[in-house]
Amino acid sequence: MKILFAGTPIPAAVVLEHLLADTRFEVAGVITQPDARRGRGRTLHPSPVAKVATDHEIPVHKFESLKAQTDSGAAAREVLEEYRADGVEAIAVVAYGNLIPADLLNVVPLGWINLHYSLLPRWRGAAPVQAAIAAGDATTGATIFRIEEGLDSGPIIAKSSQDIALDATADDVLTDLTYSGRELLADALVDLSAGTIIPEPQPTEGVTHAPKIDPSDARINWDAKVEVIQRVARAHTPAPGAWTTLQGERFKIGLMMPASEAEAAEVAVDGLLAPGELRATKKAVFVGTGSAGEVLRIEAIQPPGKKMMAAADWARGQQVLLDSEPSFD
């Protein structure tokens, strides 16, 4: 089966590698975002997908936009028409990052087939994994659907689900879904080509949205309930990173887990630890929450100008600070 691949970040590159290794496919070309500036030198770097394609000597197309009224969009239409004439059946999509205009949705016979990181119609949008964790969903999954004009509203081809563990961060879930989703996408493409599966319209009930994450979404409100705080930290790890302030400086907080009753009793004063109040033992760091008597154990913390580290390691060098009984703001 001859296909194109459209994607940009690391998860998309992982899926592309899988499709390239699958003998059922011929990846004729790759569409990705233009090179981006990063690092201290602000030098241009190709996307992870572009790098994989180049390593495999596959043509790479970097369109700034697919809009018809742009030079980039006009070039894209010419390229896509050539691929259709050459027998490309479908375009596999994973986190491409550009909207697909209506006039291009049927540019190849089977259209643009997208791997989405949620159980649609729940969590349509840019940040479905983060939204699922923050909302306390017990399960999530991957959905393969055909892109149409609406946001992640196209007909569903295949789904797979998995549980969300209490200690699973957004990175953990995204990684799991990338590896399970790449298998799901490959099989769905083959079934579509063979005509053995028919996409089904999404239900009209149960639609929720997961907009792009803003850094303000990742700020921890220590007055919130313990389970809400814990989920916010997991949902935004590693990026953009859950954060708070301590004595005017910004700290990122990694995974936090509920403290045991024995741990809470050891660090709490009169059985309570105020929201945001810090306490440390020789082995761990704890913080109070808005749930009376409920304490979280901080597993990882990133002080200003430092890398993420074990919270207990950070605490060993902060005895004077911790003796002052500080609180996160």
Image (cartoon, helix red, strand yellow):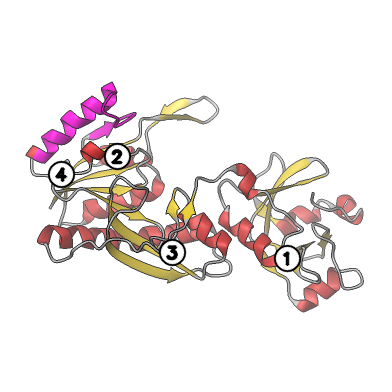
In the current view of this chain or complex, which residue is farthest to the front? 204
* Comparing labels 3 and 2, the label whose residue is closer to the camera: 3
Residue type, label 1: Leu
Residue pointed to by mark 4: 108
Question: For residue 223, which quarter of the picture?
Answer: bottom right
> Which is more foreground, mark 1 or mark 4?
4
Ranked by sequence position, the earlier of labels 1 and 2 is 2
Residue 58 x/y as whole percent = 21, 39
Q: Position of residue 129 (x, y in %)?
A: 48, 57
Label 4 – label 3 distance at C-alpha:
31 Å
Q: Which residue is mark 2?
A: 100
**Mark 4 element type:** loop
Q: Is residue 63 above or below residue 296?
A: above
Looking at numbered disc 4 in the image, what kind of residue is underneath it? Val
Q: Is 298 positioned to the left or the right of 238 in the image?
A: right
Residue at 23%, 59% (x, y): give it.
Answer: 186
Q: The disc labelled 3 sits on which kind of residue?
A: Gly
Residue segment shown in magenta? 60-84
Q: Amino acid at mark 2?
A: Ile
Toward the viewer: 211 or 50? Answer: 211
Q: Measure the C-alpha gap from mark 1 to mark 2.
A: 44 Å
Cα–Cα span, label 1 and label 4:
52 Å
The residue positioned 56% from the left and 62% from the top of the image is 135
